[in-house]
Image (spheres, rainbow, N blue to C red):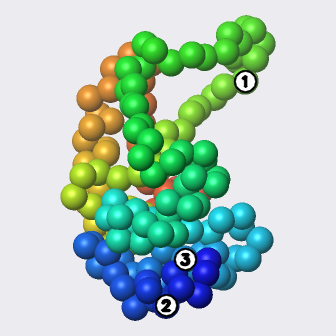
Amino acid sequence: MTQEIWDEYKDKSDASGVSFKVCIFSGVKNLDSGIGLYAGSHDSYTTFSKLFDKVVQEYHGHAPDAKHTSDMKADDLQNADFSEEDAAMVVSTRIRVGRNLDGYPLGPGVTKEQRLEIMNKVVEACKTFEGDLAGTFYPLEGMDAAVS
């Protein structure tokens, strides 16, 4: 990060109230983390674009004007074929929600109350899963050690 970027952003926050300092906190505290820059909300990418655009382009190879295409259809997933022996080793799987729901900040900027709201919405959505997508939700906080 250049001095110019620091001077411009150091006291700014994005539209969700997430400060620039929150976005760079991980990288400042963990110098060996690789990047250590995390958007606190969707607006962080715009508000702090001089830094985020450079990092996204260098790390992911996507220019600021690149367009992302999502395909959320499970039938279109390409999976490896497992032998019967390998398949037998799979006892459970985990779904990681790595981003957020519309109207909520991203991980670094979300409050505890908002995390609980998001979790409850995701749990309700997961209850609609059928067949091989159906399962049991176990929250990390308060989970019995025997289950983990």
Q: Quadrant of residue 30?
A: bottom right
Q: Are marks 1 and 2 in contact (CB under 8 Å)?
A: no
N-terminal label among 2 and 3 = 2
Residue tagged 3: 24
Residue 116 appears anywhere in the view:
no
Mark 2–mark 3 Cα distance, whole angstroms, equals: 14 Å
Q: Quadrant of residue 85?
A: top right
Above or below, 14 against 86 in this view is below
State which mark lies toward you, 2 or 3. 2
Residue drawn at point x = 71 percent, y = 12 percent? 82
N-terminal label among 1 and 3 = 3
Residue 128 % position (x, y): 26, 29
State which mark lies toward you, 1 or 2. 2
N-terminal label among 1 and 2 = 2
Residue 117 % position (x, y): 25, 60
- Taking depth in this image into account, of 87 and 49 the one nearest to the observer is 49
What SS does tag 3 mark?
helix
- Taking depth in this image into account, of 137 and 73 the one nearest to the observer is 73
What SS does tag 1 mark?
loop
Residue tagged 1: 89
What SS does tag 2 mark?
helix
Q: How many marks?
A: 3
Q: Which dot marks residue 7?
A: 2
Q: Is residue 48 left or right of residue 103?
A: right
Residue drawn at point x = 31 percent, y = 44 percent? 123
